[in-house]
Amino acid sequence: MVNVEHSGRTADGLGPADGPGARLRAARLALWAVAAILAVRQMTAVLTSPSGKRLTDLETWVGPQGVLHVNGSLYDSTRFTGTLFAGLVLKPLTRAAEDALGWGWTFGTLLLVVALGLVAARALPQPVSRRTALLAAPVAISLLMLSLPVRNTLWLGQTSVIPVLLVLLGCLAVRDERAGGLLVGLAAALQPTVLLFAPLLWFTGRRRAAVSTGITFAGGTALAWAAMPHDSYTYWVHHVAGAGLGGEADGLANQSLHGALLRLGLTGPLEIALFLLLGAAVAVLALRRAVRYARDGQFLLAVAVTGCAAVAVSPTSWQHQLLWLLLAVVGRVGTRAADRTVWPVAVVLVTILPAKMMLPNTPVLFPLRDNLVLLAALAAAVAVPFLPRSSPYYAAPVPADYARQLPARWRHVPLLPFLRRSLTRPNLLLELLLIRVTYAAYQQVRLAATGGSNELARATAEHHGRIILDTERFLHLDIEHAVNHAVVQVGWLRSFLDFYYESFHFVLPLTVLAVLYWRRPVDYRWARTSLGFATLLALIGFWLFPLAPPRLMPGLGFVDTVHGVQDLAHPDYGAMTAITNQYAAMPSLHFGWSLWCGVVIAVMAPRWWMKALGLLHPLFTVTAIVATANHWVLDAVGGAIVVGGGFALGYLLIGPRGVLASTAAEGVGRPPGQRKAPDEERSLTTS
């Protein structure tokens, strides 16, 4: 919220001057409703899961053989990962937890998450606008509910929210230094790397709090050692502050430097020495940055930076312990308003989505993908250049120039007038990130559209295939079999169409987007939006109408020219067998995306022969998808419909495409004397 409030518009209103207060109240209520829905959804997801598959970590504490109910070591099972102090303090609570293991623990954790969001929202660095102050709390709570750390905490029955909340209360909410240090010390007793906050408190002038933190941690640890000396030795010496508890240290869930080095193949004394060296360097650099931000009045950011360093230097940082990274969303990065959203969007995506959705499933990227959260935490701790409040761009980044809205054919168009088109290029990193995540979501929805590869799904898809074939026969469009067998007889034509089918589906749309991004940034936004809407409509079609393509229809005699003869019970279509759904044929996005390319090129290309080549692409594509038996003719019709719908939705929601750049918000956000970029001076035709 605090990252996007300054974008060249007024800060206190969400709409026209005649009703900003009403709109603000409506937005606030809507956001609180979203937060409540997410909370209920998370609780329902946990409580409706079968026993034994939910709250599994909590059940190790309170079950019939729970580790806190045995006379031996707490760490005999290695499933209990907390400190001795955590076991000592929380053991009495397990009796009550046995009576209400589901509702009580889950609801209590949700309340802690809400409290965490409220404290973080109240700690935003000043000054903030009235809009941000009112909307920050529900936004923060919603992001926390969506984050993987909170979802894992709820699912596993963990206590990892407690240390984060204690630190925020001790550093940001409690005025008495000794009381604040007591809370931070309790958090450190539960999670030892929280001790990094003691030097932060010391070097920011809160020395009583730092001393209180150290004393509380030492007292709690000593108390646990006196009560359970054998377990204390096991935790602090044998397991080196918990390393190896809860799973293998080189597991993907351990997003610490220690886990990353083990995954890279380093072991033994060399790995330990390198971990200690890198951990010390990260801690020192992060604390220096955190002290600087704290003295600048950004104490919430200082807490986030220190917490990210704690994630990196801990021997084990399991996924449910990574909430510190989400707090780093409050940092402001970039001097332009167009760049201000890159960091918060990246942080939110990294903390909400699995790493496999963030990066392609390519072996060369596995080391990056496997350590993505760690890399984000390291970036927040030591690398990202957060702006100080003294920077002239902190409160007022360079605003974007927006195109003048053209009159539409209908009075109420555009339906979303606040989605104005900027005349400058969007941030490339943000675009690549969103494109990747959108495509990953597209893959997941498409794969799930038939419920996997079960027999019922296959029967449904084949039934729909027979419906399509009967419809085409009625309309005299059933040319697929004749075209397929005619092409099979001509070797060079078959090879060409196979190559065209496999190669141009992704290459050409990406090329068109790249050229538009570089040469026509305003039109890039229009084209990218229409393509996104078309793909979204296609996903709805995949979900509602799973359809077997001709090559996977039994008894019809089609030849799969691309993948060869298939066992229809277990089809094999190369490397994509396990990650794609071949029954997502209606509508055909092969044809739909090619038609989108043809329309965009025909509208924007400066030469007639370029327009003609653009329109040839969908013609070649529809020939290829029919000849290779990958789609029915009606699939192409469906592809054309969703592309038309994509352009129509773009028009209805955002308005007509083009403007004359010379009439757009002249001089807004541009320093005196600065010339417009060439792509801004170019005239854009209206659609």
Image (cartoon, rainbow, N blue to C red):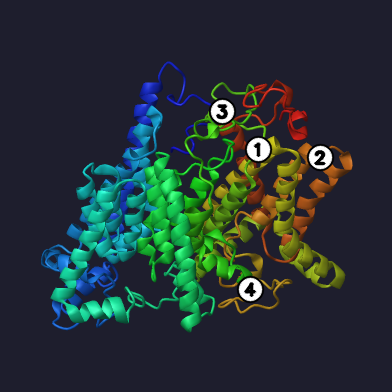
Q: Is residue 366 visible?
A: yes
Give the Cα distance between marks 2 and 3: 26 Å
Tell me which numbered mark, 3 or 4, is placed earlier along the sequence. Answer: 3
Identity of the residue drawn at 21% across and 60% down: 215
Q: Which residue is mark 2?
A: 605
The mark found on residue 150 in the picture is none
Taking the view exactly as shown, the residue that stands out farthest to the top is: 18
Give the Cα distance between marks 3 and 1: 13 Å
Q: Which residue is mark 3?
A: 414
Question: Which quadrant, please, contains the C terminus?
Answer: top right
How many marks the image carries: the answer is 4
Give the Cα distance between marks 2 and 4: 36 Å
Q: Residues within 10 Å of mark 2 (few under 14, many from 20)?
A: some
Identity of the residue drawn at 74% across and 51% down: 511
Q: Secondary structure at mark 4?
A: helix
Place of residue 95 in the rendered image (x, y in percent of width and height, measured from the top left): 11, 67
Identity of the residue drawn at 26% across and 73% down: 52
* Residue 53 horizontal side relative to residue 400, left or right: left
Q: Amino acid at mark 1?
A: Trp
Q: Residues within 10 Å of mark 1 (few under 14, many from 20)?
A: many
Q: Secondary structure at mark 3?
A: loop
Q: Nearer the viewer, residue 360 or 264?
A: 264
* Residue 275 horizontal side relative to residue 648, left or right: left
Q: Nearer the viewer, residue 156 or 392?
A: 392
The mark found on residue 575 in the picture is 4
Q: Secondary structure at mark 2?
A: loop
Placement of 383 over or under 205, stated as above or below? below
Q: Which residue is mark 1?
A: 526
Tell me which numbered mark, 2 or 3, is placed earlier along the sequence. Answer: 3
